[in-house]
Amino acid sequence: MKVVSRVLGTREQRLKEPLPPRGVRIALYAALFLLGGLVSLFGAFVQTVWPPVGLLLTLVATAALFYAGLRATGTKLGAGVPLAGWFVVLMVLLAPRQEGDLVLEASVTSYLYLFLGAVAGVVCATLPTRSGFGFGVPPAEPRQAVRNGRP
């Protein structure tokens, strides 16, 4: 665990990092959606060409992208947007063509790629972030506890 905390930082260090400006986050969301689609496209072929090493390589790439989105934007949406791009491209690749060709065949490695990639995205989207809100927008004013009708 010490190696992981040295590479990724401790939870307290990650939560103290400032959020990027809103315009930068929006640009990052667009880039992350496209990167999610590219990782999905390349992963569909790599996991088939080099089983089981290709499967491990694609799963590491997908998890790294989802975590990088989370860290770059500081929001949970930063992990969800590349997951959405990854999933949209996979749905297109799963559809059979008129010629009968399939990009993702019905094999164990393809099913593991689909399942474990989705699990990696959901796990990254549930990690603690610098902002508790999806878009990184804090509430207008902090809430105060009310006791006996007085704040």
Image: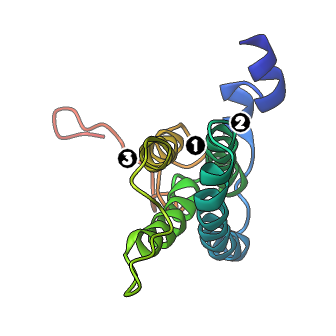
The Cα atoms of the two marked residues, 3 and 2, are separated by 25 Å
Q: Nearer the viewer, mark 3 or mark 2?
A: 2
Relative to 78, does residue 55 appear above or below in the rendering? above
Kind of residue indicated by mark 2: Arg
Q: Quadrant of residue 33?
A: bottom right
Q: Which mark is residue 143?
A: 3
Name the side, left or right, on which 89 lies relative to 53.
left
Which quarter of the picture shows residue 19? bottom right
Q: Earlier in the sequence, mark 1 or mark 2?
A: 2
- Pick the residue in front: 43 or 11: 43
- Residue position marked by numbered label 1 in the rendering: 129
- Mark 1 is on which residue type? Thr
Residue 139 x, y percent position in the rendering: 45, 58
Q: Measured from the top left, where is residue 85 in percent x and y?
A: 53, 69
Q: Disc 3 vs disc 2: Cβ atoms closer than 8 Å?
A: no
Q: Quadrant of the N terminus?
A: top right
In the image, 50: left or right of 7? left
Determine whether 49 is above or below 22 in the image: above
The answer to whether marks 1 and 3 mark residues whose Cβ atoms lie closer than 8 Å is no
Q: From where the camera sits, is residue 74 visible?
A: no
Q: Pick whichever of labels 3 and 2 is earlier in the sequence.
A: 2
Q: Residues within 10 Å of mark 1 (few under 14, many from 20)?
A: many
Compare marks 1 and 3 and give the one earlier in the sequence: 1
Q: Residue at x 61, y 67 (%)?
A: 41
Q: Position of residue 128 (x, y in %)?
A: 54, 37
Helix, strand or loop for disc 2: helix
At mark 3, the secondary structure is: loop
The answer to the question of whether label 1 and label 2 lie on touching residues, with beta carbons closer than 8 A, is no
The residue that appears at 56% across and 49% down in the rendered structure is 131
* Mark 2 lies on residue: 14
Badge 3: residue crowd in 10 Å (few <14, some 14–19, many ≥20): few
